[in-house]
Amino acid sequence: MLHYSGMPIAALKLDTMRVEKPWGRRTLPTPFGTPNAPLSDPVGEIWFEMPGRPLDLMIKYIFTSEKLSIQVHPSDDQARRAGHRQGKEECWYILDAEPGASVGIGTKRKLTADELREACRNGDIESLMEWIPVKRGDFFYIPAGTVHAIGVGISLVEIQQNADITYRLYDYGRPRELHLDHGIDVSNAQPYPAAMRRHVSIEKAGRLVDGPKFKLSVAHDSIPRLDGRGPYFVVPLEGIVATDNGVAKPGDCVVTGDPSRVVPLGGARMFVARSCGGDLFRNSPTTIW
């Protein structure tokens, strides 16, 4: 059995934490809320945590009622030079989207650092972003350095390196702090590669992401063994799975050191993710299948 941070891991359902955000929602979709029971404060994210045990990856659900800031994350090397443990790469799977909803990923043309700075200062960056209409099943990989934003009316699952490091470039005039110097230093303001996006049917099992920072698959009847280090993260999307501390259903997240300890039941469809261990795969290209 894998020991992680000194603790043996079988197959455990992680604790859930609601994170309030000004751009979140007071009414969350099932299974997180009910239409007739609005929240007193808007919730924008659902996190999964093991108290006192930092995990390699973070799994989030995100719910938006406003546009999120246009932002960027640094690479591992860039983050370490700034005194952080690691940078952040992430991917999004769209669970639901209102008509006309879109995400901004990359810019319509390549921008120099000076052009990016000026566009962020005068607000032109919003029109220079590539806004992509989205629907359920759309999948995007967001490499470090990609200028990006999540639009209004979207629910998604985010799998990311577990690093709380975001540089806000533009926030539509809202009075939150911007991080232009750090953000522009790490930005690759250029068109988003088509190879980094696809439409995913969870009825088809298979690999979605194969490095460099983590691996991600859609699984059905069993949990695939993914090369890499760190525990496995299992995110049920349909059906239920059995764990050592009960059953997990959509809206839950399971961590395990032994994938055979997670037993899918009755038509389960799930994401399975595993960290690649940072620098171990630093020079490997990212592929999406």
Image (cartoon, rainbow, N blue to C red):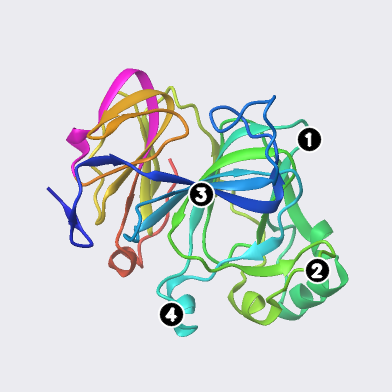
Residue 267 falls inside the magenta stretch? yes
Numbered disc 3: secondary structure: strand
Instruction: Tell me the amino acid under the disc marked 4.
Output: Arg
- Label 4 residue SS: helix
Q: Amino acid at mark 1?
A: Gly
Q: Nearer the viewer, residue 69 or 144?
A: 69
Residues 151 and 198: in front is 151
Depicted 277 relative to depicted 119: above or below: above
Kindly identify which numbered label has been placed on residue 100.
1
For disc 2, the neighbor class at 10 Å (few under 14, some 14 to 19, many from 20) is few
The residue labelled by disc 2 is 175
Distance CA(mark 3)–CA(mark 1): 21 Å
Q: Are marks 3 and 1 in contact (CB under 8 Å)?
A: no
Q: Is residue 145 left or right of residue 5?
A: right
Tell me the SS state at disc 2. loop
**Start-end of magenta stretch:** 258-272
Q: Residue at x 51, y 32 (%)?
A: 200
State whether the magenta stretch is mostly helix, strand or loop.
Answer: strand
Q: Which x, y percent locates residue 36?
A: 69, 24
Give the CA distance from mark 3 to mark 2: 28 Å
Q: Whole-percent x and y of residue 199?
A: 55, 33
The residue that label 4 is drawn on is: 80
Give the residue pinned by disc 3. Answer: 91
Kindly report the distance in space between the C-alpha atoms of the residues bearing marks 3 and 4.
Answer: 21 Å
Assess whether mark 2 and mark 3 are in contact (beta carbons under 8 angstroms).
Answer: no
Count of all numbered marks drawn on residues in the image: 4
